[in-house]
Amino acid sequence: MDSDARDDAEPAAGTMPYLLTPGPLTTSVATKHAMLSDWGSRDIEFRALVASVRTQLLELAHAGRGYECVLMQGSGTFSIEAALSSFIPQEARALIAMNGAYGKRAEKILRRLGRDVVILDKGDTAQFTGADIADALDRDPAVSHVFAVHCETTSGIVNPLEEICAEIKSLGRTIIVDAMSSFGALPIDMEASAIDVLVSSANKCIEGVPGFGYVLCRRDLLEASAGRSHSVSLDLFEQWQNMESSGQFRFTPPTHALVAFATALEEHAREGGVAGRGARYARNRDILIEAMRALGFETLLADDIAGPIIQTFLTPRDPAFEFDRFCEELRTRGYAIYPGKLTARDSFRIGTIGRIDETVMRGAVDAIAETLQLMGVEDLSPA
Ligand SMILES: Cc1ncc(COP(=O)(O)O)c(C=O)c1O
């Protein structure tokens, strides 16, 4: 981010904190400003904006003529549930490649829907390999669909998407990818990787505000899903049909979030698209990790699998380290962070995405150092 862009960033310490979280994220002033107008959901300008957002998302995903983009109101989970219920038939068996909470959430959705599910659980700290998936599919030929999370935001681990997809495709299964926290910052080529379905949302790496998610998918799968959804509001086929025929959402759209997203997409392009955005996040990550290690913190993950989205640090063993106080002190200094989400170890997470740059990361680490001193924390080795 150049200095002009930083002037455009909000907030400054002392007002609202920078959101060093997995989303919602700190957004630019221009993105927030776009929400100051009230758009009618049926207006021709709004419908044109929706059409343009759909086209741009397909372009970003390298999804060509055979693909469609369906926007869905709600948080990312609503789009995940819409995709799972629409694309996995009642009689199918799905494999969930799991290494964190978002794989677990997909399992919960599928079980609630009465689908047959098998789990390949790698724990919190190991990536999936293509070979892991190939073994699981060999063992269970009845599996027809594979669900995998690209960046498991539970820890920040990035699974090797291309390698996994190549295996799944060569074994003839349908691939559903949760790219919620990676799309827009990590390269994804849906056509080259033969990804059938991909889900993400507005308030992650495109840096929009919360309000909707999107499902990018093969058109023939969408057509075949007619009448399958258990839900009226999450029925992707009907949502798509309506968008195609009238350019409108079926039910009240998050107009402000969509207009903000259109601005966020312009800024994404100005920053150099996926490569530019990914490079800024990687710089944020490098600065954060180096400075946190210099203070004495340990990361959960090895550097080669940690990714540039969110970093997990192990909770220090020093009894003076009390997470709630640590968090509150940071918040008063202008930085919001999240607790860990691991099953096995105590940890906390610091996000490196959103409208933040090196200056913000350095400011955050200074605030952490000050807070540790204030709390009297000396031993940062993990519990
Ligand atoms: C990988 C992943 N999947 C799914 C979700 C769920 O999205 P939401 O919280 O918007 O429902 C998240 C949210 O952070 C995520 O990171």
Image (spheres, rainbow, N blue to C red):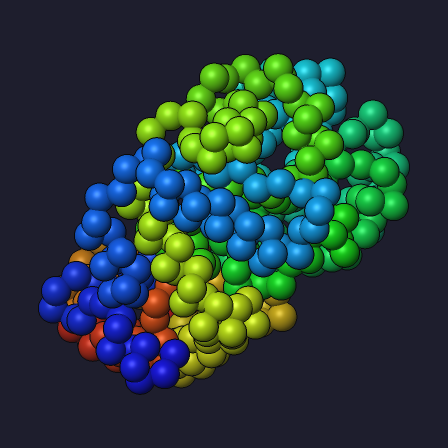
Q: Position of 379 compared to 63: left or right?
A: left
Question: What quarter of the picture does the C terminus occupy?
Answer: bottom left
Which image quarter: residue 183? bottom right
Quadrant where the N terminus is found in the figure = bottom left
Q: Residue at x 72, y 43 (%)?
A: 66
x and y, in percent, of residue 317 in the image? 36, 63
In-front residue for pair 206/281: 206
Residue at figure coordinates x 56%, y 27% from the top left:
241
Relative to the observer, which residue lies in front, 30 or 337?
A: 30
Q: Quadrant of residue 112?
A: top right
Quarter of the image where one finds residue 95: top right
- Residue found 54% across the figure and 37% down from its top: 70
Q: Name the spot of residue 262 as percent of width and height, x first.
A: 40, 55
Residue at the front extreme? 44
Please indicate, yes or no, whether residue 41 appears anywhere in the rendered image. yes
Q: How many marks?
A: 0
Residue drawn where x is 34% and y is 50% of the image:
259
- Image spot of residue 147 (x, y percent): 66, 38
Residue toward you, 78 or 117: 78
Residue 125 showing in the rendered view? no
Q: Residue furthest left?
A: 14
User: Where does the image place residue 227, in percent across and percent down from the top left?
Assistant: 62, 15
When the figure is inspected, residue 129 is found, relative to residue 361, above or below; the finding is above
